Image (cartoon, rainbow, N blue to C red):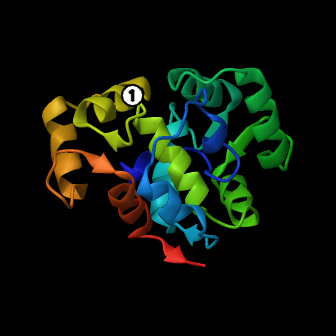
Amino acid sequence: MAKLSLLNFQYNLSRRLPSKPARWGSSERQWSGLSPSFQPNIEEMKRVFDTFDANKDGKISKEEYRSVLRALGKQNVETEVTKAFKVADSDGDGFIDFKEFMDVHEKGGGVKPVDIKNAFKTFDLDGNGKISAEELLEVLKRLGDRCSLETCKKMVRAVDADGNGLIDMDEFMKMMTQTMKLC
C-alpha cells in the first residue's frame, strides 16, 4: 500500500481528493504537532513513479497524470496537471522523467506527517478514521490495480497492529514511515 503513494506527497497528494471533514480523534492531536519529514528510499519512489507511468516508457505524460487524478475523483484536474508539470518538468519536454520526479521530491523536503494524513484520507473513503479492506480495494481499483478482496485483507492484516481488521491513523503512519528515514 505504501508503494501506491502518488507522484509526490509534497506537491500533489494533499490536493487529490475532494476535502471531507477529518475525524481522527486522538490520532489527529498526536500527529498534528510533528514537523519532521521522511525520505522514502529510491525503490519506493520508483514504484510510486511506475504507478503513474502507465505505458512504462520511463516518463509520466500529462495524460497519465490526468488519469490518476481522475481515478481518484480529483476535481480541477487540469489546474493540478498544469501546476505539477510547471514544477516538475524542468526540461520543458512535456513529460516528467524519473530524475525530474526525484528532483521535485528532494526539493520538497520529503514526506511530512500532514502529507501522510492526506494519503490516509485517500484510502479512508467513508471518513470514519479507519481503512477497511473494501476501501483499500476500491482505491486500488481506481488506480487500475487488479487485486482481490482477499489480497486487500492480507494487506490490512499485515499492518493491523490491534487486530480489529482495520487500519487506523497510527497504524498507517507506522506503515508509511517504517521504510523511510527521518530527515
Report the label total. 1
Residue located beneath label 1 in the image: 126
Image coordinates of residue 98 in percent, x first then y, are 63, 53
Q: Is residue 58 visible?
A: yes
Please state if 38 lies on the left or on the right of 141 as rendered.
right
Q: Residue at x 32, y 40 (%)?
A: 131
Q: Nearer the viewer, residue 8 or 85?
A: 8
Left or right: 11, with 177 as reference point: right
Residue at (37, 55) in percent of width and height: 172
Q: Going by the image, does 106 lie left or right of 1?
A: right
Name above or below for residue 84 compared with residue 115: above
Residue 38 location, quadrant: bottom right
Residue 77 is left or right of residue 4, and the answer is right
Q: Image point 73% across, 21% down: which residue?
A: 76
Please tell me whether residue 29 is drawn above or below residue 13 in the rendered image. Answer: below
Quadrant assignment, res 112: bottom right
Observer able to see residue 5: no
